[in-house]
Image (tube, rainbow, N blue to C red):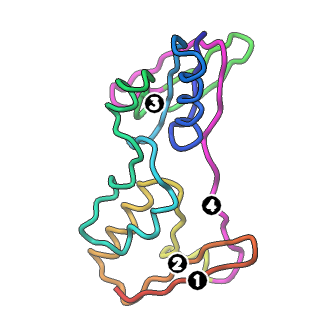
Amino acid sequence: MKTVIIGGIAGGLSAASQIKREEHGAQVIVLEKSGDVSYAACGMPYNLFYKDKPVEDLHALSLDEIRKERGIDYRLYHEVVAIDPSRKEVTVVDRELSREYREKYDYLVYATGNQPNRLSLPGFDDADVFHFKTLDDTRLVKNIIYEKSPANVILVKKKSDGFRLKARQV
């Protein structure tokens, strides 16, 4: 059995790990378009306020642990650009080697995550408003905070019971 998983962060890696636990001999390929392995996304906003704490500290597992200990073929910088269900194959762009290839599968898991909620309020579409989905988003904002030194940073987090604001001088 060969399973291809599109997306290698929390959901994708969880699915891959569960498949390997259930069927140790299964071939599991995770295609992750970013350069990051699975990470604790909930820690991204908190990491911003620690200048010397690397964003990579949010990684849940190392690439070696995923590949060697879990037996998962985890491919970074691999973006799926097409899915052909009738042929049971995906078209993949390997951005490190600048090549395109097709990967066959028996089972396909689509685990690309969510999209940030974008508020439709005045000011929330300004160039200095950022949304968090990836560690690259965290790297960008952290760089702005410590390179451009804004006077204040405000985090807005949507909760089921409304919005939560956190303000901090940096």
User: How many neighbours does mark 1 have within 10 angstroms: few (below 14), some (14-19), or many (20 or more)?
Assistant: few
Relative to 109, residue 55 above or below? below
Which residue does the numbered mark 3 point to in the structure image? 78
Q: Magenta stretch containing residue 14, yes or no?
A: no
Q: Residue at x 66, y 83 (%)?
A: 122
Which residue does the numbered mark 1 point to in the structure image? 165
Element class at badge 3: strand
Relative to 165, residue 51 above or below? above
Q: Residue at x 53, y 56 (%)?
A: 133
- Asked if disc 2 and disc 1 are in contact, CB closer than 8 Å, the reply is yes
Gap between marks 2 and 1 measured at Cα: 6 Å
Specify the segment rendered in magenta: 93-122
- The mark nearer the N terminus, 2 or 3, is 3
- The image position of residue 38, as x and y in percent, is 46, 43
Q: Residue at x 50, y 73 (%)?
A: 127
- The mark nearer the N terminus, 4 or 3, is 3
- Asked if disc 2 and disc 3 are in contact, CB closer than 8 Å, the reply is no
Quadrant of the image for the C terminus? bottom left
- Callout count: 4
Element class at badge 2: strand
Relative to 74, residue 111 above or below? below
Gap between marks 4 and 3 measured at Cα: 22 Å
User: How many neighbours does mark 4 have within 10 angstroms: few (below 14), some (14-19), or many (20 or more)?
Assistant: few
Which residue does the numbered mark 2 point to in the structure image? 155
Amino acid type, callout 2? Leu
User: How many neighbours does mark 3 have within 10 angstroms: few (below 14), some (14-19), or many (20 or more)?
Assistant: many
Quadrant of the image for the N terminus? top right
Amino acid type, callout 4? Pro
